[in-house]
Amino acid sequence: MSVRDTMIAKLTERFSPLHLEVIDESNKHRGHAGWREGGETHFRVRIATRDFDGLSRVAQHRAVFETLDAELKDRVHALNIEVLPVG
């Protein structure tokens, strides 16, 4: 399973998102810190979930980072998170 697919599975299980995109942007970072041959190092997550209702932006991001902790410690160098409005 690719890193992207693993991230999608974990975020879906944890947050039951109404909308989820996990975009591998590694090709935009070729030659930058953390980039590796084969990609899967730099990602953008766009997520809309009711699980974030009432949480601060910091708490929302912490929840995503916590969910993807293993990937961030292993292969993923950078993660951009966009929390989208629900409804």
Image: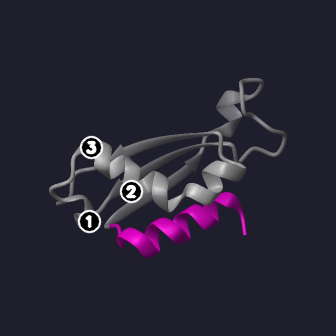
Q: Nearer the viewer, mark 2 or mark 1?
A: 2
Q: Earlier in the sequence, mark 2 or mark 3?
A: 3
Query: Residue 8 colored magenta?
Result: yes
| CB under 8 Å between discs 2 and 1 | yes
Q: Is residue 4 above or below residue 43?
A: below
Tell me residue 14's x, y (percent): 41, 71
Q: Earlier in the sequence, mark 2 or mark 1?
A: 1
**Crowd class of label 3 (few under 14; some 14 to 19; many from 20; radius 10 Å):** few
Tell me residue 23's x, y (percent): 55, 49
Q: Is residue 22 above or below residue 30?
A: below
Tell me residue 55's x, y (percent): 21, 53
Q: Is residue 10 above or below residue 21?
A: below
| Amino acid under disc 2 | Ala
- According to the image, label 2 marks what residue? 63
Q: CA distance from mark 3 to mark 1?
A: 12 Å
Secondary structure of the residue carrying numbered label 2? helix
- According to the image, label 3 marks what residue? 57
Q: Looking at this view, is 66 or 6 the one in front?
A: 66
